Each structure stands twice: as structure tokens, then as C-alpha cells.
Image (cartoon, helix red, strand yellow):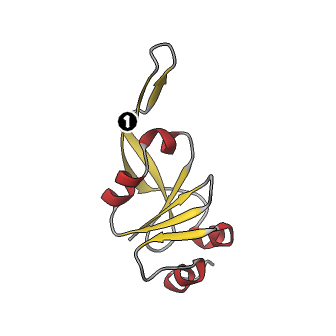
Amino acid sequence: MIFAMDTVYFGLYVLDSEAAAIALCPGLEVAEGDWQFFASDGSALEPDFSVPAYVDTKRLKYGNGIYSLRAGAGTMLQEMLHKVAVVHGLTEFQTAEDVKVLLPPNN
């Protein structure tokens, strides 16, 4: 399970795989910091771009790049749940409280 948080509207997406998270989150938005990712235990994941996202304003082109997710240092999901406005994705999770029950305590 992977969690993706939209840092603009604070929607939390509960996804069944890394591939689902990458398909949901465009690389350009990820590179701009509009998404945060978390592993099933709530630990931070960070994008690792093998092909960079870019914006070419002169040619009016952009590219989402190609990225994968790897373990990162950063805020745990447990610390971010109070910001969650809505939960999307796997149907057994309807609220931030539903997600909190799944996660280990943040020590």
C-alpha cells in the first residue's frame, strides 16, 4: 500500500501499489512539490527521477519525466493526518481516522 497526499487540497489517496501512485501523480506536479508519498507504515517516500520533469516556456512544452519512489527522510504520514480533508482510493478507507488505525504509532 502507498499513500499519496495532494499538498494543494490535502486529499489523501490510498493506493494499492507504487505503479498506481505514479500513474495518479504527474511527474511535473511531483517535481513542483504538489505531492507527498508515504509507505504502508507511514514513513516518507521521495521521488527519484530517472528522466527529469521540465517546462520549456519558449516552446510551450513540458515533460512529466519518469520517476520511481524510494525511502526518504521527512515527515511521517501520522504527523500529517490532521491536515487531510478527504480520503480517496481503496474503499475501506473513508476518513483520516480509518487510515490512522492502520498505521503504527508515531514514536
Residue extending furthest toward the right = 82
| Whether residue 18 is situated above or below residue 61 in the rendered picture | below
| Whether residue 56 is situated above or below residue 90 in the rendered picture | above
Near mark 1 (Cα within 10 A), the count class, few <14, some 14-19 or many ≥20, is some
**In x, y percent, where is residue 75?**
61, 62
| Whether residue 107 is situated above or below residue 83 in the rendered picture | below
Residue extending furthest toward the bottom = 101
Q: Quarter-wise, where is residue 82 in the image?
A: bottom right
Q: Quarter-wise, where is residue 40 in the image?
A: bottom left
Residue extending furthest toward the top = 58
Q: Where does label 1 land, which residue?
A: 65
Which secondary structure, mark 1? loop
Q: Which residue is located at x 57 percent, y 79 percent? A: 95
Q: Which residue is located at x 48 percent, y 80 percent? A: 93
Q: In this rendered view, identify the residue nearer to me: 5 or 50.
A: 5
**In x, y percent, where is residue 79?**
65, 70
User: Across the whole image, how many numbered discs are drawn on residues?
Assistant: 1
Q: Which residue is located at x 43 percent, y 42 percent? A: 27
Seen in the image, is 35 located left or right of residue 80? left
**In x, y percent, where is residue 54?**
45, 28
Q: In this rendered view, identify the residue nearer to me: 46 or 87.
A: 87
**In x, y percent, where is residue 106?**
61, 77
Seen in the image, is 26 located left or right of residue 80? left
**Amino acid marked by disc 1:** Gly
Seen in the image, is 78 located left or right of residue 91? right
Which quadrant of the figure contains the C terminus?
bottom right
